[in-house]
Image (cartoon, rainbow, N blue to C red):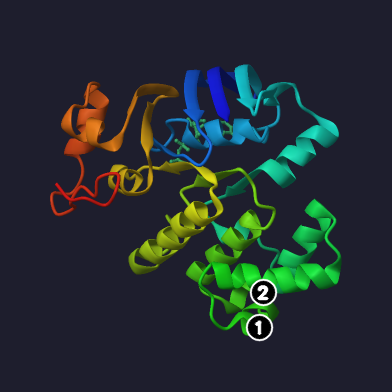
């Protein structure tokens, strides 16, 4: 479904050309969950942003990104808008950056569905309630009426997930969606995201620096360092037989107390 081939990206900042991605190759099949793991600055976010063509202004992108056979790098205007509103959704680290502080979250969801899918307001209001139930929110009416500052980070990220799945996208790009949350909430939100994805048969490209978390929710993992995919494989393979020294380093740097979850929740 998604195929990234030889993706290279250079950012222009203050007249300097900064090479950020170098011939990245990566695929995501229909309904599949794929992780990108690497340290800060390795190019994980830029890979995701390239897929939606939201890389920084002045960037140069080469290679191919095909989604269901269409080269995304050649899209613009209405086809690109359609890709972003109907086919691929993205969840970022910080829900506050997405939600408008002066809009009740119900309006955020309703306006999103109205703008992206042309859904009439009445139908969108009903759907907003259903979506919040789907992401595990009990007191739907109160949450719909609330403004972002009245809700916890975990609740806000659930709202963002609800907005992301509203259009039934085929692929969800999740960029460290739980990093800004406290540890208990992280686990809850990750479980909700994983459940929604499976129920809806959505594929996911999941960016994290946490190898164990990726192993728990991903079918395959690509390890990135300095803009290069140094190794990819299924989680058990990376655990039992890491080929690249950087993967071994990542494995070794995990706190000893953290058990390896394995791809289907198994422990070591
Ligand atoms: N707007 C920008 N201008 C210049 N350089 C940038 C810009 N955005 C990102 N970069 C650089 O691109 C490289 C890759 O950044 P990217 O955000 O993809 O890393 P990442 O792996 O997602 O890191 P993190 O885990 O910290 O989010 C980094 O070296 C970063 O400094």
Residue 130: percent from left, percent from top = 64, 71
Q: Tell me: 14 left or right of 115.
A: left
Is the residue under label 2 in contact with that under label 1 (CB below 8 Å)?
A: yes
Q: Is residue 170 visible?
A: yes
- Give the residue drawn at x 54%, y 65%: 158
- Disc number for residue 35: none
Residue in front for this viewpoint, 266 or 89: 266
Q: Is residue 151 above or below residue 90?
A: below
Residue 171: percent from left, percent from top = 58, 42
Which of pointers 1 and 2 indicates the residue nearer the eye? 2
Q: Tell me: 252 left or right of 158.
A: left
Residue in front for this viewpoint, 127 or 102: 127
Residue 203: percent from left, percent from top = 52, 42
| The image quarter in which residue 219 lies | top left
- Give the residue drawn at x 60%, y 71%: 132
Q: Is residue 16 visible?
A: no
Alpha carbon separation for disc pair 1 and 2: 7 Å
Counting labels gives 2
Residue 113: percent from left, percent from top = 77, 59
- Disc number for residue 141: 1
Q: Which residue is mark 2?
A: 129
Q: Earlier in the sequence, mark 1 or mark 2?
A: 2
| The image quarter in which residue 84 lies | top right
Q: Tell me: 216 left or right of 148.
A: left
* Label 1: which secondary element: helix
Image quadrant occupied by the N terminus: top right
- Give the residue drawn at x 54%, y 75%: 137
* Label 2: which secondary element: helix
């Amino acid at each position: 479904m998604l195929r990234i081939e030889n993706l290279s990206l250079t950012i222009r900042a203050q007249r300097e050309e900064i090479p950020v991605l170098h011939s990245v190759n990566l695929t995501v099949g229909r309904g599949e969950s794929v992780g990108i793991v690497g340290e800060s600055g390795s190019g994980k976010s830029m890979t995701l942003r390239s897929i939606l063509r939201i890389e920084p202004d002045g960037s140069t992108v080469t290679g191919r990104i095909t989604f269901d056979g269409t080269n995304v790098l050649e899209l613009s205007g209405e086809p690109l808008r359609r890709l972003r509103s109907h086919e691929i959704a993205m969840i970022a680290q910080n829900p506050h950056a997405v939600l408008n502080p002066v809009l009740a979250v119900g309006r955020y969801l309703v306006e999103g569905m109205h703008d992206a899918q042309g859904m009439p307001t009445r139908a969108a209001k009903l759907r907003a309630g259903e979506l919040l139930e789907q992401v595990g929110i009990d007191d739907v009416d109160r949450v719909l009426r609330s403004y972002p500052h009245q809700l916890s980070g975990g609740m806000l990220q659930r709202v963002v997930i609800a907005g992301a799945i509203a259009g039934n996208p085929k692929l969800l790009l999740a960029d460290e969606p739980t990093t800004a949350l406290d540890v208990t909430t992280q686990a809850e939100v990750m479980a909700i995201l994983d459940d929604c994805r499976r129920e809806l048969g959505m594929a996911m490209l999941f960016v994290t620096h946490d190898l164990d978390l990726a192993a728990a929710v991903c079918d395959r993992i690509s390890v990135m360092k300095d803009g290069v995919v140094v190794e990819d494989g299924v989680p058990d393979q990376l655990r039992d037989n890491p080929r690249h020294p950087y993967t071994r380093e990542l494995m070794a740097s995990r706190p000893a107390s953290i058990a390896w979850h394995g791809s289907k929740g198994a422990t070591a």
